[in-house]
Image: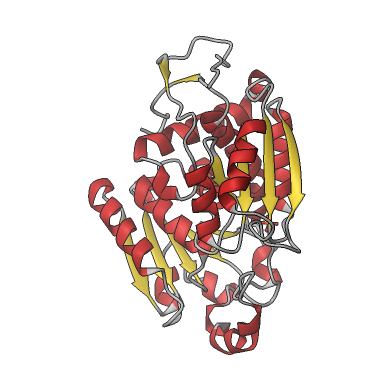
Amino acid sequence: MRSQTIAAEPAPHPITTTFPGRDLVSIRDLSPLELESLFHLASLIKTRPEEFRAALAGKHIAMFFEKPSLRTRITFEAAICGLGGSVSFIDQRHERLDARETLNDIAHNLERWVGGIVLRTFAHETVEGMAEHACVPVINALSEVEHPCQALADYFTLQEKFGDLRKITLAYVGDGNNVMHSLLLTAALLGSKIRLGTPKGYGANPQILADAREIAKQTGAVIELMSDPRKAVRGVDAVYTDAWTSMGHEHETDERARIFPPYQVNNELIAVAAPHAVFMHCLPAHRNEEVTDAVIDSVRSIVFDQAENRMHVQKAILTMLIGGKTRQPLRSAHA
Ligand code: CP
Protein backbone atom coordinates (compact mmCIF):
# COMPACT_ATOMS: atom_id res chain seq x y z
CA MET A 1 0.00 0.00 0.00
CA ARG A 2 1.39 3.40 -1.01
CA SER A 3 2.38 5.55 1.96
CA GLN A 4 2.67 9.29 2.32
CA THR A 5 3.93 11.80 4.87
CA ILE A 6 1.21 14.24 5.85
CA ALA A 7 2.31 16.50 8.70
CA ALA A 8 4.13 19.58 7.42
CA GLU A 9 6.16 20.22 10.59
CA PRO A 10 8.49 17.80 12.35
CA ALA A 11 6.58 16.06 15.14
CA PRO A 12 8.00 16.31 18.68
CA HIS A 13 8.54 12.53 18.67
CA PRO A 14 8.92 11.46 15.03
CA ILE A 15 7.45 8.01 15.50
CA THR A 16 5.34 6.67 12.71
CA THR A 17 2.14 5.24 14.11
CA THR A 18 -0.29 3.85 11.58
CA PHE A 19 -1.97 0.53 11.11
CA PRO A 20 -2.46 0.51 7.32
CA GLY A 21 -4.44 -2.33 5.87
CA ARG A 22 -6.10 -3.21 9.20
CA ASP A 23 -9.83 -3.31 9.86
CA LEU A 24 -11.96 -1.61 12.51
CA VAL A 25 -14.75 -4.12 13.05
CA SER A 26 -14.66 -3.95 16.85
CA ILE A 27 -13.04 -1.74 19.46
CA ARG A 28 -11.16 -4.96 20.28
CA ASP A 29 -9.16 -4.39 17.06
CA LEU A 30 -7.27 -1.58 18.85
CA SER A 31 -4.61 -1.73 21.55
CA PRO A 32 -4.54 0.85 24.36
CA LEU A 33 -1.53 2.56 22.73
CA GLU A 34 -3.22 2.63 19.30
CA LEU A 35 -6.31 4.18 20.85
CA GLU A 36 -4.18 6.85 22.50
CA SER A 37 -2.47 7.56 19.16
CA LEU A 38 -5.84 7.71 17.41
CA PHE A 39 -7.11 10.37 19.83
CA HIS A 40 -3.91 12.33 19.42
CA LEU A 41 -4.26 12.26 15.63
CA ALA A 42 -7.94 13.22 15.87
CA SER A 43 -6.94 16.22 17.96
CA LEU A 44 -4.32 17.26 15.39
CA ILE A 45 -6.78 16.85 12.52
CA LYS A 46 -9.47 18.82 14.36
CA THR A 47 -7.16 21.75 15.07
CA ARG A 48 -5.12 21.69 11.83
CA PRO A 49 -7.42 20.17 9.16
CA GLU A 50 -5.56 21.90 6.34
CA GLU A 51 -2.48 19.72 6.96
CA PHE A 52 -4.49 16.57 6.22
CA ARG A 53 -6.26 17.67 3.03
CA ALA A 54 -4.32 15.11 0.93
CA ALA A 55 -4.33 12.22 3.43
CA LEU A 56 -6.68 10.16 1.23
CA ALA A 57 -5.65 11.64 -2.15
CA GLY A 58 -6.28 9.12 -4.90
CA LYS A 59 -8.29 6.84 -2.58
CA HIS A 60 -11.92 5.89 -3.26
CA ILE A 61 -14.07 4.55 -0.41
CA ALA A 62 -17.28 2.51 -0.79
CA MET A 63 -20.02 2.83 1.85
CA PHE A 64 -22.83 0.24 2.02
CA PHE A 65 -25.63 1.00 4.52
CA GLU A 66 -28.43 -1.52 5.26
CA LYS A 67 -29.96 0.87 7.85
CA PRO A 68 -30.86 4.58 7.82
CA SER A 69 -28.31 7.17 8.92
CA LEU A 70 -27.87 10.92 9.27
CA ARG A 71 -24.69 11.40 11.32
CA THR A 72 -22.67 8.40 10.22
CA ARG A 73 -23.28 8.87 6.52
CA ILE A 74 -22.64 12.62 6.44
CA THR A 75 -19.64 12.54 8.79
CA PHE A 76 -17.95 9.77 6.80
CA GLU A 77 -18.65 11.52 3.49
CA ALA A 78 -17.42 14.87 4.86
CA ALA A 79 -14.37 13.18 6.41
CA ILE A 80 -13.40 11.36 3.20
CA CYS A 81 -13.84 14.50 1.06
CA GLY A 82 -12.01 16.62 3.68
CA LEU A 83 -9.04 14.24 3.44
CA GLY A 84 -8.94 14.50 -0.38
CA GLY A 85 -10.56 11.13 -1.12
CA SER A 86 -13.72 10.28 -3.03
CA VAL A 87 -16.70 8.15 -1.99
CA SER A 88 -19.58 6.05 -3.33
CA PHE A 89 -22.62 5.65 -1.04
CA ILE A 90 -24.71 2.55 -1.77
CA ASP A 91 -28.17 2.51 -0.15
CA GLN A 92 -28.76 -1.12 0.93
CA ARG A 93 -31.91 -0.43 2.95
CA HIS A 94 -34.11 -2.47 0.60
CA GLU A 95 -31.88 -5.51 0.09
CA ARG A 96 -29.26 -7.05 2.40
CA LEU A 97 -25.73 -6.66 1.15
CA ASP A 98 -25.25 -10.33 0.28
CA ALA A 99 -28.74 -10.91 -1.21
CA ARG A 100 -27.59 -10.73 -4.85
CA GLU A 101 -24.16 -12.38 -4.68
CA THR A 102 -21.92 -13.81 -2.01
CA LEU A 103 -20.02 -11.58 0.39
CA ASN A 104 -16.84 -13.24 -0.81
CA ASP A 105 -17.47 -12.23 -4.45
CA ILE A 106 -18.47 -8.68 -3.45
CA ALA A 107 -15.25 -8.35 -1.41
CA HIS A 108 -13.04 -9.57 -4.25
CA ASN A 109 -14.67 -7.08 -6.64
CA LEU A 110 -14.43 -4.15 -4.26
CA GLU A 111 -10.78 -4.69 -3.35
CA ARG A 112 -9.88 -4.17 -7.05
CA TRP A 113 -11.50 -0.72 -7.09
CA VAL A 114 -11.49 0.93 -3.69
CA GLY A 115 -9.09 1.73 -0.86
CA GLY A 116 -11.56 0.97 1.92
CA ILE A 117 -15.09 -0.24 2.72
CA VAL A 118 -17.47 1.26 5.31
CA LEU A 119 -20.42 -0.94 6.33
CA ARG A 120 -23.61 -0.40 8.34
CA THR A 121 -25.34 -3.77 8.64
CA PHE A 122 -27.91 -5.72 10.62
CA ALA A 123 -25.69 -8.78 11.19
CA HIS A 124 -22.29 -8.26 12.77
CA GLU A 125 -21.17 -11.33 10.79
CA THR A 126 -21.58 -9.33 7.57
CA VAL A 127 -18.92 -6.84 8.69
CA GLU A 128 -16.69 -9.67 9.95
CA GLY A 129 -17.15 -11.57 6.67
CA MET A 130 -16.27 -8.57 4.54
CA ALA A 131 -13.19 -7.94 6.68
CA GLU A 132 -12.17 -11.57 6.30
CA HIS A 133 -12.55 -11.66 2.50
CA ALA A 134 -11.50 -8.15 1.40
CA CYS A 135 -7.82 -7.23 1.42
CA VAL A 136 -8.62 -3.51 1.89
CA PRO A 137 -9.59 -2.05 5.30
CA VAL A 138 -13.19 -2.54 6.45
CA ILE A 139 -14.74 -0.12 8.96
CA ASN A 140 -17.82 -0.98 11.04
CA ALA A 141 -20.23 1.96 10.83
CA LEU A 142 -22.72 0.12 13.14
CA SER A 143 -23.79 -3.48 13.38
CA GLU A 144 -26.16 -5.15 15.83
CA VAL A 145 -23.21 -5.82 18.17
CA GLU A 146 -20.99 -2.72 18.03
CA HIS A 147 -20.80 0.93 16.97
CA PRO A 148 -17.05 1.57 17.36
CA CYS A 149 -16.86 4.92 15.55
CA GLN A 150 -19.54 6.30 17.86
CA ALA A 151 -17.82 5.21 21.07
CA LEU A 152 -14.44 6.52 19.90
CA ALA A 153 -15.96 9.93 19.16
CA ASP A 154 -17.75 9.86 22.54
CA TYR A 155 -14.61 9.20 24.59
CA PHE A 156 -12.66 11.72 22.49
CA THR A 157 -15.35 14.26 23.45
CA LEU A 158 -14.98 13.32 27.12
CA GLN A 159 -11.21 13.74 26.86
CA GLU A 160 -11.79 17.28 25.54
CA LYS A 161 -14.11 18.03 28.48
CA PHE A 162 -12.27 16.32 31.34
CA GLY A 163 -8.69 15.59 30.27
CA ASP A 164 -7.53 12.38 31.95
CA LEU A 165 -10.10 9.69 31.13
CA ARG A 166 -8.73 7.41 33.86
CA LYS A 167 -10.13 9.84 36.45
CA ILE A 168 -13.72 9.93 35.28
CA THR A 169 -16.79 7.67 35.55
CA LEU A 170 -19.38 7.32 32.83
CA ALA A 171 -22.77 5.79 33.59
CA TYR A 172 -24.68 4.25 30.71
CA VAL A 173 -28.36 3.72 31.54
CA GLY A 174 -30.93 1.97 29.38
CA ASP A 175 -30.72 -0.76 26.77
CA GLY A 176 -27.52 -2.82 26.58
CA ASN A 177 -27.10 -2.30 22.87
CA ASN A 178 -24.31 -1.94 20.29
CA VAL A 179 -23.36 1.57 21.46
CA MET A 180 -23.08 0.38 25.08
CA HIS A 181 -20.86 -2.53 23.99
CA SER A 182 -18.44 -0.21 22.19
CA LEU A 183 -18.44 2.26 25.11
CA LEU A 184 -17.68 -0.61 27.50
CA LEU A 185 -14.74 -1.86 25.41
CA THR A 186 -13.40 1.67 24.90
CA ALA A 187 -13.57 2.40 28.64
CA ALA A 188 -11.72 -0.87 29.27
CA LEU A 189 -8.95 0.02 26.79
CA LEU A 190 -8.60 3.51 28.26
CA GLY A 191 -8.38 2.34 31.88
CA SER A 192 -11.50 4.39 32.63
CA LYS A 193 -14.44 3.66 34.94
CA ILE A 194 -17.84 2.71 33.55
CA ARG A 195 -21.14 1.75 35.17
CA LEU A 196 -23.81 -0.05 33.20
CA GLY A 197 -27.35 0.46 34.52
CA THR A 198 -29.60 -1.86 32.51
CA PRO A 199 -32.82 -3.77 33.26
CA LYS A 200 -32.48 -7.50 33.88
CA GLY A 201 -32.39 -9.30 30.54
CA TYR A 202 -31.13 -6.21 28.68
CA GLY A 203 -27.50 -6.20 29.82
CA ALA A 204 -24.24 -6.58 27.93
CA ASN A 205 -23.42 -9.43 25.58
CA PRO A 206 -21.57 -11.94 27.82
CA GLN A 207 -18.63 -12.35 25.43
CA ILE A 208 -18.12 -8.59 25.13
CA LEU A 209 -18.33 -8.21 28.90
CA ALA A 210 -15.77 -11.00 29.38
CA ASP A 211 -13.44 -9.40 26.81
CA ALA A 212 -13.81 -5.98 28.46
CA ARG A 213 -13.00 -7.48 31.87
CA GLU A 214 -9.92 -9.19 30.41
CA ILE A 215 -8.70 -5.87 28.95
CA ALA A 216 -9.50 -4.11 32.24
CA LYS A 217 -7.11 -6.44 34.09
CA GLN A 218 -4.28 -4.92 32.04
CA THR A 219 -5.41 -1.28 31.98
CA GLY A 220 -6.88 -0.88 35.48
CA ALA A 221 -10.34 -0.03 34.14
CA VAL A 222 -13.28 -0.47 36.51
CA ILE A 223 -16.50 -2.01 35.21
CA GLU A 224 -19.63 -2.04 37.41
CA LEU A 225 -23.00 -3.56 36.56
CA MET A 226 -26.26 -2.63 38.26
CA SER A 227 -29.94 -2.62 37.46
CA ASP A 228 -30.85 0.42 39.62
CA PRO A 229 -30.44 3.54 37.42
CA ARG A 230 -30.07 5.85 40.46
CA LYS A 231 -27.20 3.77 41.82
CA ALA A 232 -25.59 3.73 38.39
CA VAL A 233 -25.74 7.51 38.04
CA ARG A 234 -24.77 8.50 41.59
CA GLY A 235 -21.78 10.88 41.55
CA VAL A 236 -20.71 10.17 37.95
CA ASP A 237 -19.09 12.65 35.56
CA ALA A 238 -21.11 11.64 32.49
CA VAL A 239 -24.58 10.15 32.00
CA TYR A 240 -25.18 8.40 28.67
CA THR A 241 -28.34 6.90 27.24
CA ASP A 242 -29.64 5.65 23.90
CA ALA A 243 -32.93 4.60 22.33
CA TRP A 244 -34.84 1.91 24.22
CA THR A 245 -35.53 0.12 20.94
CA SER A 246 -32.66 -0.11 18.49
CA MET A 247 -33.02 -0.61 14.74
CA GLY A 248 -34.05 -4.22 14.08
CA HIS A 249 -35.95 -4.62 17.41
CA GLU A 250 -39.04 -2.59 16.45
CA HIS A 251 -41.34 -5.57 17.12
CA GLU A 252 -40.35 -5.30 20.85
CA THR A 253 -41.28 -1.60 21.13
CA ASP A 254 -44.44 -2.07 23.29
CA GLU A 255 -42.75 -4.48 25.72
CA ARG A 256 -39.73 -2.20 26.06
CA ALA A 257 -41.99 0.82 26.65
CA ARG A 258 -43.28 -0.99 29.78
CA ILE A 259 -39.80 -1.93 31.08
CA PHE A 260 -37.60 1.10 30.43
CA PRO A 261 -39.39 4.20 31.91
CA PRO A 262 -37.40 4.01 35.23
CA TYR A 263 -34.27 4.44 33.08
CA GLN A 264 -35.42 7.73 31.51
CA VAL A 265 -32.77 10.42 31.97
CA ASN A 266 -34.78 13.31 33.41
CA ASN A 267 -34.00 16.14 35.83
CA GLU A 268 -34.62 13.88 38.82
CA LEU A 269 -32.20 11.18 37.67
CA ILE A 270 -29.42 13.46 36.48
CA ALA A 271 -29.58 15.38 39.78
CA VAL A 272 -28.03 12.29 41.40
CA ALA A 273 -24.91 12.64 39.19
CA ALA A 274 -22.01 14.97 40.04
CA PRO A 275 -22.93 18.69 39.84
CA HIS A 276 -20.60 19.08 36.84
CA ALA A 277 -21.91 15.95 35.06
CA VAL A 278 -22.50 16.08 31.32
CA PHE A 279 -25.32 14.38 29.40
CA MET A 280 -24.49 12.26 26.35
CA HIS A 281 -26.53 10.54 23.62
CA CYS A 282 -25.41 9.15 20.28
CA LEU A 283 -28.60 10.43 18.58
CA PRO A 284 -31.15 10.18 17.14
CA ALA A 285 -32.95 10.83 20.44
CA HIS A 286 -36.53 9.84 21.12
CA ARG A 287 -37.36 12.94 23.09
CA ASN A 288 -39.34 12.39 26.28
CA GLU A 289 -38.79 8.63 26.05
CA GLU A 290 -35.17 7.79 27.05
CA VAL A 291 -34.36 11.48 27.73
CA THR A 292 -36.51 14.51 28.48
CA ASP A 293 -36.30 17.78 26.57
CA ALA A 294 -35.25 19.44 29.84
CA VAL A 295 -32.07 17.33 29.97
CA ILE A 296 -31.08 17.07 26.31
CA ASP A 297 -31.60 20.82 25.83
CA SER A 298 -29.82 21.76 29.07
CA VAL A 299 -26.34 23.20 29.51
CA ARG A 300 -25.18 19.74 30.62
CA SER A 301 -25.88 18.29 27.18
CA ILE A 302 -22.87 17.67 24.92
CA VAL A 303 -24.73 15.70 22.27
CA PHE A 304 -23.80 18.02 19.41
CA ASP A 305 -20.11 18.00 20.45
CA GLN A 306 -20.31 14.22 20.18
CA ALA A 307 -21.92 14.53 16.74
CA GLU A 308 -19.25 16.98 15.56
CA ASN A 309 -16.44 14.76 16.80
CA ARG A 310 -17.75 11.83 14.75
CA MET A 311 -16.22 13.60 11.75
CA HIS A 312 -12.83 14.42 13.32
CA VAL A 313 -12.38 10.96 14.84
CA GLN A 314 -13.43 9.21 11.63
CA LYS A 315 -10.89 11.33 9.75
CA ALA A 316 -8.25 9.95 12.13
CA ILE A 317 -9.52 6.38 11.65
CA LEU A 318 -9.48 6.72 7.86
CA THR A 319 -6.00 8.28 7.91
CA MET A 320 -4.57 5.57 10.13
CA LEU A 321 -6.15 2.63 8.31
CA ILE A 322 -6.18 3.81 4.71
CA GLY A 323 -4.17 7.02 4.42
CA GLY A 324 -0.69 5.64 4.81
CA LYS A 325 1.95 6.99 7.16
CA THR A 326 1.45 10.05 9.31
CA ARG A 327 4.09 11.52 11.57
CA GLN A 328 2.78 12.04 15.04
CA PRO A 329 3.83 11.64 18.65
CA LEU A 330 3.04 8.21 20.00
CA ARG A 331 1.77 9.55 23.32
CA SER A 332 -0.81 12.25 23.84
CA ALA A 333 -0.55 15.16 26.25
CA HIS A 334 -2.57 13.12 28.75
CA ALA A 335 -0.18 10.14 28.80
N1 CP B 1 -25.34 8.06 16.01
C1 CP B 1 -25.53 7.58 14.78
O1 CP B 1 -24.92 6.57 14.36
O2 CP B 1 -26.39 8.33 14.02
P1 CP B 1 -27.01 7.88 12.63
O3 CP B 1 -27.82 6.64 12.86
O4 CP B 1 -27.82 9.06 12.15
O5 CP B 1 -25.86 7.59 11.68
Q: Residue at x 64, y 18 (%)?
A: 51
Q: Residue at x 55, y 35 (%)?
A: 136
The answer to whether residue 229 is above or below residue 242 is below
- Residue 297 appears at what percent x and percent y? 70, 62
- Residue 236 appears at what percent x and percent y? 43, 62
- Residue 118 appears at what percent x and percent y? 62, 45
The answer to whether residue 319 is above or below residue 223 is above
Q: How many numbered circles does the render carry?
A: 0
223 left or right of 91 in image? left
- Residue 141 appears at what percent x and percent y? 60, 51
Q: How is the image coloured?
A: secondary structure
Tell me if residue 72 can be seen: no
Q: Work out whether residue 311 or residue 240 is closer to the camera in this orientation and state it.
A: 311
The answer to whether residue 19 is above or below residue 232 is above
175 left or right of 290 in image? left
Q: Which picture quadrant has residue 243?
A: bottom right
The answer to whether residue 100 is above or below residue 259 is above
Ligand 1 quadrant?
bottom right
Q: Work out whether residue 89 or residue 30 is closer to the camera in this orientation and state it.
A: 89
Q: Residue at x 65, y 54 (%)?
A: 101
